[in-house]
Image: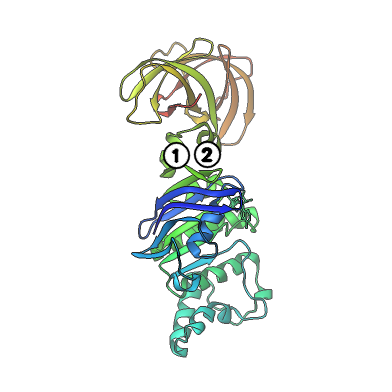
Amino acid sequence: MKVEDLVVRYGKVTAVRDVSFTVEDGEFVSLLGPSGCGKTTTLRCIAGLEASSAGVIRIGEEIVAADGLEVPPEKRGINMVFQSYAVWPHMSVFENVAYGLRTRREPREQIEAKVGEALSTVGLEGYAKRYGTELSGGQQQRVALARAIVTSPRLLLFDEPLSNLDAGLRERMRYELVELQRRLGKTSLYVTHDQSEAMLMSDRIILMKDGEMVQMGSPRDLYDRPASRFAAEFIGNANLVTGEIRRADQRRAEVVLEGGIVLEGGFAWPDHARQSGPVLVCVRSESIERVPEGTTGVNCLDAVVETVSFLGATISCVLRVGTLGLRADLAARNPPEPGSAIRVRIDPEAVTLISEH
Ligand SMILES: Nc1ncnc2c1ncn2[C@@H]1O[C@H](COP(=O)(O)OP(=O)(O)OP(=O)(O)O)[C@@H](O)[C@H]1O
C-alpha cells in the first residue's frame, strides 16, 4: 500500500499535508500522533470514506485514489475496524460476520466455513448464535475483527479499535491483535494516539503532527533517535536540555550543556554531522545508571539525589547535576537516600543530539 503526497483540505483547514509512506505486504504500521494531527483523515482517505484534495493512493498495484479518481470503499479490497465496534445488536454473531460474504452472494456452505474459521481465529467458537447485545466489549471487538478478516481483504485498517475497552482488557487485546496480525500476515495500518500501543504493536510507526509526518521508523528508531523535540517528548520519558557542540565526527559529538557539563552523544540526523552550534540534547531517564564512587570515563558525572519515588522495578529520581535537574530511573535495589551524593554514568548511545534547540 502506498500513499504519495496526500493532501486533504476542509475549506481553509489543511487536515493532511503532503503525506507519503508505504506499508509493505504483511507489515503492521501505525499512524501515531496527538488528537487532530490528521491520522484518522489519512486512514479514511485510504478507506475511500473521505475524498483527498491531492495525491495518489495505491492498494497493491491498483490506484484507488488520484486526481479525478475515487474507487468506492467496497471496491478497494480493504476492511476497517472502528473504535465503536459497529456490531449490529439485532443480528447474531454469525450474521454479523457473514454480512460481507452475503453481499457478495457467496454460496451458503462457503459462508458457513469461512465464518466458522474467522470466529475460531478470533477465539469466539461457540458464540455464533449469540446476539450483539449479549456480548462484552471485548467480545464485540472480536466480532468486529472476525468481520474484518472474513472477506480476506488486501489491507486492514484500524481506527483506535481498543480505546473503548477498559485498561486491562485493552492491554490483553493489544497482544492478541498483534499475534493475530502476525499469524495472518495481513498488511495493516493502525491509527492510535497512544504511544505505548504503537510501540508494542508496530513494525514501523509514522509520527504525525499538525497534518504532517514528522518521523517514520521502527519503534526502536523513534525511541533511540527522536528527530525533534516533539518526537522526544511524545515517545517515552526524555530529559531535554540545550547544549552547544564542541567537537564532532560523523558518528559522535561532544556537547557542553548549560552549566558547563560535558556529554557525549550520537546524532539524530545521521549523515549531517555538524561541527559546532546549538543543539537539543535528549537523555532518556532509564539511560542514567548509578556507578561506584570514583568511576571515570565518558559521561560519568557527580549528582545529588533530590527526590526518590518508588515505582516497583525501578525508582524514579530527580538528580541535580551541577545546575541541571535530570529525571533518572534507577534500579530499585539499594536506592540512594534523598540528599545523598552519587556517581552516575549516561550511556552515550542513549544520548541523542537533535538539531532543534
Ligand atoms: N469533516 C471535517 N470538516 C472540517 N474539518 C475536519 C473534518 N474532519 C477533520 N477535520 C479537521 O482536520 C484535522 C485532522 O482531523 P483528524 O480527525 O484526522 O485528526 P486525528 O489525528 O485523527 O485526531 P483524533 O485522534 O482526535 O481523531 C482536525 O483539525 C479536524 O478538526
Q: Closer to the N terminus: mark 1 or mark 2? A: 1
Q: Nearer the viewer, residue 349 or 247?
A: 247
Residue 323 in percent (x, y) is at: 58, 12
Q: Amino acid at mark 2?
A: Ile
Q: Is residue 11 above or below residue 81?
A: above
Residue 105 in percent (x, y) is at: 47, 87
Numbered badge on residue 80? none
Query: Furthest residue to the bottom?
Result: 108
Q: Locate the N terminus and report the quarter of the image it occupies.
A: bottom left
Q: Tell me the element at label 1.
A: helix
Looking at the image, which residue is at 44% across and 53% down? Answer: 29
Where does label 2 land, which residue? 235
Q: Is residue 48 above or below residue 355?
A: below
Q: Quadrant of residue 143?
A: bottom right
Where does label 1 land, which residue? 222
Q: Quadrant of residue 164?
A: bottom right
